[in-house]
Amino acid sequence: MIKIYHNPRCSKSRLGLAALEASGKEFEIIKYLEDELSSKTLTSIISKLGIKPIDLVRKNEAIWKSDYKNKTLTDQELIEAMVKHPKLIERPIVINGDKAVIGRPTEAILEII
């Protein structure tokens, strides 16, 4: 089952959702700002993306700049920061089986569905 980690307020996330809808495939919407992600789930997502936790962080968010920017954090500390402050997570994330992409650009989503 395809999953999209979605923030309805984000234009890129809405574009990603539209791409999935246009594909005609079934998918599940996870509104990660409402449905809290666990550290285990986020670790799994990062693994499927094939990136380091820092690469999933939105570094222009106010909470990043005020609380984390100039600190040296371990991967686990970065994951815990994203669990605590899900606005820090890049979006949208689309997962299809063991493949995952950050939907920036939206065309990246089409490569895994």
Image (cartoon, rainbow, N blue to C red):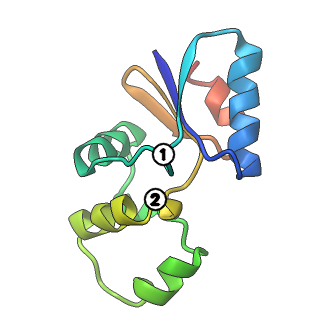
- Mark 1–mark 2 CB contact (< 8 Å): yes
Q: Is residue 109 left or right of residue 75?
A: right
Please report the residue visible at 48 percent of the width from the left and 45 percent of the height from the top: 32
Quadrant position of the N terminus in the picture: top left
Q: Amino acid at mark 1?
A: Tyr
Quadrant of residue 15 in the image? Answer: top right
Looking at the picture, how far across and down is residue 80, in whole percent? 28, 64
Q: Nearer the viewer, residue 112 or 19?
A: 19
Alpha carbon of mark 1 to alpha carbon of mark 2: how far? 7 Å
Going 54% across and 73% down the picture, which residue do you hit?
A: 59
Question: Does the rendering let one see residue 105?
Answer: no
Q: Which mark is residue 86?
A: 2
Q: Is residue 113 left or right of residue 55?
A: right
Q: Is the C terminus in the top left, top right, bottom left or bottom right quadrant?
A: top right
Please, what is the three-letter code of the amino acid marked with disc 2? Pro
Instruction: Residue 97 in the image: state x and y as whole percent.
Output: 40, 20
Q: Is residue 106 left or right of residue 99?
A: right
List x then y, in percent, for residue 75. 26, 65
Label ID, residue 45 = none
Which one is in front, 49 or 26? 26
36 shown above or below 21: below
Residue occupied by mark 1: 32
Q: Which residue is found at the position 46% from the left and 57% from the top?
A: 56
Q: Quadrant of residue 76?
A: bottom left
Q: Please, is residue 66 above or below residue 85 in the view? A: below
As drawn, 35 above or below 58: above
Q: Position of residue 99 (x, y in %)?
A: 43, 27
